[in-house]
Amino acid sequence: MRNVINILDLSVEEIEELIAVADDIIANPQKYQDACQHKILATLFFEPSTRTRLSFESAMLSLGGNVLGFSEAASSSAAKGESVADTIAVCSGYADIIAMRHPKEGAPLVASAHSSVPIINAGDGGHYHPTQTLTDLLTIRHEIGRFDNLTVGLCGDLKFGRTVHSLIGAMSRYAGVKFVLISPEELKLPSFVKQEYIKNKDIEYVQTNSLEEVMGDLDILYMTRVQKERFFNEEDYLRLKDSFILTEDKMKLARADMRVLHPLPRVNEIATAVDNDPRAAYFRQANYGKFIRMALILKLLEVSV
């Protein structure tokens, strides 16, 4: 039985296999419509989500399976004080696979020790978000065509941004990748992420607080929102929330083949006028999430089509 807690739980070869399956699903959806008939996905979301939860549910329903679960801790027995371990021990008896989001780092890893079915980490605090990274990789493959020799700019909340941490871990395995880390001082990439995925691998990187200075160097600009829910006081959030806003004027500094990604939700860090730019890939990116999650569900349930 396999769990996916961190993107690095999947080898580069396995990611290629998942992308190939996702591409086949996109091309031949009817071939997969009954692949998970009589299988049940439990979506246990102890933290609010729109895209990730609905993407998982749409993925399982599109495979002919069923879905049960809850969308916030308040509607589960966690509100009564039940532990994650107990919730998982019970729910794994009701489902064939579990997608779990939790505000506490490490909770899905704890869950995996108490589950009799595969666990997919759908986001744990500021740690990891592996299926968002799979979505990002599928998007990069479709939009740019390769993973090697790319300059990847990551902008906004690099401290708490679990999508950023997961993407850096994934991209650090490809040759010729360079990272440009764009953030205010208070939201810089954590030292443990930088050490493990960048410095230990001698990967070239730049840290800056100016988006304009580096726009012309980027193949990918990965925008993130400043996350109010990760701050301990509102004053710090209000001071930093508008640190970087991508506008049409800033897009004029970028190359014609650059792509803008964003894990969403967007607040105001990308002006809506940018949506019409063909380089804005974030809504296409959200759609790709369903197909790569379908591929991952098939893999973990060991269903072949």
Image: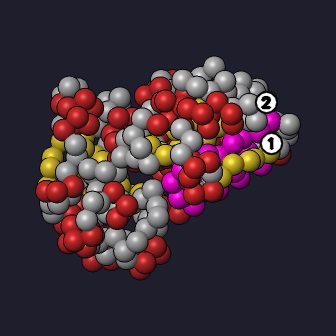
How crowded is the residue under tag 2: few (<14 C-alpha within 10 Å), some, or many (20+)?
few
Query: Is residue 94 inside the magenta stretch?
Result: no
Which residues, given as a range, are shown in magenta? 39-61
How crowded is the residue under tag 1: few (<14 C-alpha within 10 Å), some, or many (20+)?
some
Left or right of 41 on screen, residue 100: left
* Residue ID for mark 2: 305
Left or right of 127 on screen, residue 14: right
For numbered disc 2, what is the local secondary structure?
loop
- Image spot of residue 276 (x, y percent): 47, 75
Residue sitting at 69 percent across and 42 percent down?
42
Dividing the picture into quadrants, the one containing residue 117 is: top right
Quarter of the image containing the N terminus? top right
Q: Is residue 245 above or below residue 116?
A: below
Disc 2 versus disc 1: distance between alpha carbons? 14 Å
**Dot label at residue 275:** none
* Disc 1 residue type (three-letter): Gly
For numbered disc 1, what is the local secondary structure?
loop
Quarter of the image containing the C terminus? top right
Question: Which residue occupies the foreground of this view, 178 or 304?
Answer: 304
* Disc 2 residue type (three-letter): Val
Q: Is residue 116 above or below residue 79?
A: above
* Residue ID for mark 1: 65
Left or right of 276 on screen, residue 82: right
- Image spot of residue 174 (x, y percent): 35, 31
